[in-house]
Amino acid sequence: MSIFIQGVGAVTPLGSSAGETWRMLCEGGYAPRVRVPGRMADRDYLYCPLPAKFMKAARAPRLRRSSALSLAGATAAFDAIEDAGLKVGPELGEHCAVIFAICSGGVNYTRRFYDEIATQGANVASPLLFTETVFNAPASHVAALLDFDGKSYTLVGDSSVGLSAIHFATQVLATDPGLAYCLVVGTEEMDWLVSDAFASWLMASRHGQFEVYGRRTGTVFGEAAGAVVLGREHGLRIARSSAGGPFFSVREAYRAAAEVLGEVVSSGQPDLAISSANGTFADEVECRIFEDFCDAAPVYAYKAALGEALGASAVLQAVFASLALRTECLPGTLSAGTRLKRVNRKTRSIKGASRALVTTIGFNQQANALMIEN
Amino acid sequence: MSFANRSKRRVLVTGMGIVSPLGIGVEANRDSLQQAKDAVSEVTSFDVSRTRCKTAGQIPDDWLGNKLELSRKTKRLHRSSHMMIAALREALTSAATPNPELLVAATSSGGMSNGERFYRRLLAAAPRRSNPELVANYMPQKPVLDALWAARIRAPVQIISNACSSGSNAIGHAFELVKAGMHECVLAGGYDPLGELVFVGFDSLQAATPEKIRPFDRHRSGLVLGEGAAMLVLESEASALRRGVSAVAEVIGYGVSTDTYHMTQPNPSGIGPRMAMERALRAANAEAGSINYINAHGTATIFNDATEGLAISALFGQVPVSSTKSMMGHALGAAGAIEAAFCVVALRDQFLPPNINFRQPDPESRFQVVANRALPAKIERALSNSFGFGGTNASLVLQRV
C-alpha cells in the first residue's frame, strides 16, 4: 500500500508558512537569536523565537488561552491542509486522523504552573494553566478546529519523534480503510529550563551559533512547527519509513542508526539528504552513516539557520525534503564545518533529483530515517 | 494482505505483567481484586498540606526496592523505570520469552517528578550546573528505554501520550498492527508514577476528592490518583503456535473517538464514550449483548461517570460494570493498560472485579455496579474503557480463550 505526502506546512522563525520558510532558507536566511526568557541562574542562552505575528491560528477562539506550542502546531497544520488542496469541513473531519509529535510539550505553562505550586502553594495553582500542560493539548485543539471525532494520537520522544510519528501515521492509514488522510504535526516551544537542561548534558551552546559537522559545541534551540498531510494517492511517495531504533548510550548510536539507515536505503539510493546535524554528537554519527550508506548524495542541514526545534525538527526535515524535490533546489548549509565533505554549502539546483533521505539522531536514544520519492 | 483477510487474524495475549498499588505481579493483583482491597492511602512523597485531596494509590518504595531484585545499576534509576522494568520482565517471562518487533508504550507525565526536583533545586540554590541525571530521567521515553535495556531487547519504541486513554491506545494500536499482519509480536502497555504537579493539577480542577473514591455512586465526589505499569504481549495466533505458547486471552476490538467539546469535560450527551464503544464493538464484530463485563473508566468525577454511565446504559443496559480505580486510584497513562490486564485476569479466572466504596446507585445509570466485593461469573467477553483530557476516548474488547 503506497502512502503519499500530499501537503506540507510549517511556521518557523523565518516564515509563517512552509513556502516562505523554504524561500528564505534558499536565500541564505538566518533566524535572529534572542536571549531565552525566564532565567533562573547565572547563565544565559540564546534561541530562535517564533514571531507572534506568524501565529495565524491565534485568531481561533478555541486557542485564545493556549500555549505557543498549540498555536504553532495549528498554524503549521492549516498550512499543510491548504497546501494539500483540502478544505476544512465534515469530509476531511470524517476521513482524517491527527498525529502529533512532541518533545518538551507545553513547557512554558508547565513551568508557570509548577512555579505557582513551589513558590505560592498548591492551593493557589491555576487550573487554567494545568490543562495546557498535558502533552496532547495541541492535538486536542487541532482536532476541535477540524471539527473531527476520529483517531488522534500524540507521540512523545526526542528530536527523532517526528519520523516516528510519520511512520505511525503510515501504520494508521494501512490499518484503517476508512481513513483517507493523516495529518502529522510536530511542534515545539522554548523555555530557559530546556536550554539549561541540555546544557547540563553539554549539548546546548551558550552562544548564538554553532557549527554543523564541525566542532562539537552544543546546539541552539528554536521554536517551530512542521506538518505533513499523508494520503493514499498523489504527491511524493513514502518509499520507506521506519519505527526507528533505540540506542542505550552515545557509543551505540552508530549501530542503531546504521541498522535503520541500512533498511531505509535498501529501497534505493537518495539524490539528496536532509540531516539532523545540530552541533552535538549526532553530527559525528551522521557523518559516518552518510559515508557508509549513501553514495554521493549532497547533505543539507538546516538547524544552524533555524535552531534545534526538538519535537518539530524531524517533521520539518520531512517538509524540507518534500520542498527540495518539488522545487528542485537545495539550500546551502550555514555554519558548516569540515567533517562532512558532501555537505551542501551553497544553494544550488538539483534538477532531476527524485529521492530524498531524511535522517535523525535523537539526543535521547532514538535514531530514525525516512525516504521519499517523486 | 487485503483488509478482508486481515479481519480473520487473531490477536492473542500470550503474556502480561502488572505493577500497581494492589501488588507486584499478576497473581498479587488478582488476589487483591478478589479481596476488594483498598490500596488508597495518605500521600507521603510530597507535601499535601495545602491540597483538598490528600490520598492516592501508591506503590510502596520497598516493593520496588526489595521485591524486584534489581541490579546495582538499575537501582539508581527512577521509580517509573523500576515499574516498567518489573512489568516488562513479568510479561516476557509469562510469554516464554517472545521476540517482540515493536514496543508501544503509554504515559501521561513520564518522569515528571524528576522535573519537579530539577526545578526546586534551581529555585533553592541556582546551582552552577543543573543535575544531568534528573534531566535524563525526566524524558517520558527514558523508563521505557531503561526497561528495554534491562531486558536486553532492541525493539523500536512508540510512546503514546493521549492523557488518560494512553494505555488503551497503546494496546489498541498494537492490536491493529498484529491484526493487519504488519507485525507478529508487539509489546504494549503503559506506565505513570505519581507526581506532585499532576496531583495538584487535578486538585486545582477540583476533580480530586478529599473523600473516598466512589465511582458511579450517587454521592461520588471525585477521583484519587494512582500509579503503576502494565505490559501485555500481543501476538498473532500463528506466532504463538509456532512458539508453542498458550494464550491467556484474545483482543478482538478497539475503538477510539475524539470529543472536542472541552479540554477537560466530556460532552454531556455521552457521545464521545458511546462512539468509542460502538467502534470497538464494530471492530470486534460483536453485539453489545455479548459483553459480560465492563471495566469502566469510572473516575468518580461527576461529569465522567454521568456521561460514561449514560453511554453504557444506552448501549448495554443491564451489564455488570466496575471501576477498579476505586481500589487503586487513577493511574492516568497506565490506567488503560492496567485495566485491560485486569480484564484478562477476570476472563481467565472467571470473576467480576469489584467497585469498592459504593453506597448508593446513581438513578441515571441502568447497569449493574459490581458493588464492594468480587463475584464469580461466567465471562466470555469484557470491554475496557479509557477516556482522557483533550477528549481522547478508547475502548478495547477482550475475549476468553
Image: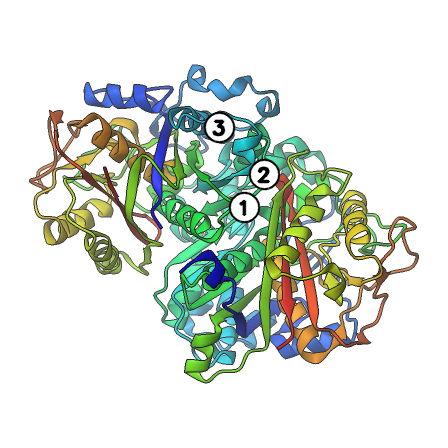
At label 2, the amino acid type is Tyr
Rendering coords of residue A36 (x, y %): 39, 27
The spot of residue B106 in percent (x, y) is: 52, 55
* Colour mode of the rendering: rainbow
Q: Earlier in the sequence, mark 3 or mark 2?
A: 3
In the image, is residue A20 above or below residue A146? above
Question: Which quadrant of the rendered structure holds the C terminus of chain A?
Answer: top left
Q: CA distance from mark 3 to mark 1?
A: 29 Å
Q: Which mark is residue A114?
A: 2
Determine whether label 3 and label 1 are within 8 Å by CB.
no
Q: Which quadrant holds residue B321?
A: bottom right
Q: Is residue A109 visible?
A: no
As measured in the structure, the alpha-carbon distance from the residue carrying label 2 to the one carrying label 1 is 8 Å
Figure check: A37 above or below A288:
above
Three-letter amino acid code of the residue under disc 3: Ala
Q: Which mark is residue B116?
A: 1
